Image (tube, grey):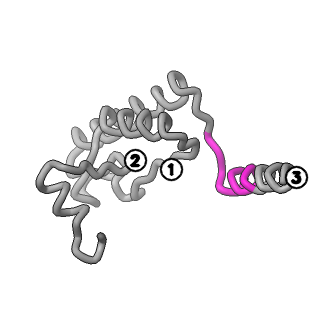
Amino acid sequence: MRSVHLPGIFARLGLLERIRLSPEGQGADDHIRLTKAMWDDGFDVFSYTYHSPSLVPGHTPYVRSPADLDRFLDHMDRYFDFFFNELGGRAATPLTLYQQWQDRGKIWAADL
């Protein structure tokens, strides 16, 4: 499917929506909708990313002015307010996630 670029073609035709959990390109409403859909599908780990140069106006196409930076930060504030307060999400380091994954594996192996 990827070799013929179907995801991109479907997105351009409006048949598929591609959303990344990043304030670079999408807003908080899109992120909240994506997270709710993924949560309903059983996902429980979410990675929210951005490039640090976007925190300085003029360094990326996503933040060209102080007003863009205000919008950028507002998108993050709104998403994290939803994630932590409405969804009950928790922040975690990669090491913590790895340890939890290992612990789950031990439980699953013990159940076999």
Question: Dot 3: within a 10 Å radius of its alpha carbon, few (fewer than 14), some, or many (20 or more) residues?
Answer: few
- Do the numbered discs 1 and 2 sit on residues whose CB atoms are within 8 Å? yes
Residue at point 57%, 46% (across, down): 45
Is residue 93 highlighted in magenta? yes
Mark 1 or mark 3: which is in front? 3
Residue at point 22%, 75% (across, down): 4
Mark 2 or mark 3: which is in front? 3
Q: Residue at the left extreme?
A: 13
Q: Which mark is residue 21?
A: 2
Q: Quadrant of residue 69?
A: top left
Magenta segment main secondary structure: helix
Q: Secondary structure at mark 2?
A: loop
Residue hosting label 1: 47
Q: Quadrant of residue 50?
A: bottom left
Q: Quadrant of residue 90?
A: top right
Question: How far across and down, in percent of the image, does residue 5 sit?
Answer: 23, 70
Amino acid under disc 2: Leu
Q: Which mark is residue 72?
A: none
Q: Residue at the front extreme?
A: 112
Question: How far across and down, in percent of the image, does residue 17 sit?
Answer: 25, 48
* Number of marks drawn: 3
Residue hosting label 3: 110
Q: Which region of the structure is painted magenta?
A: 91-101
Establish if 102 lies above or below 76: below
Q: Earlier in the sequence, mark 2 or mark 3?
A: 2
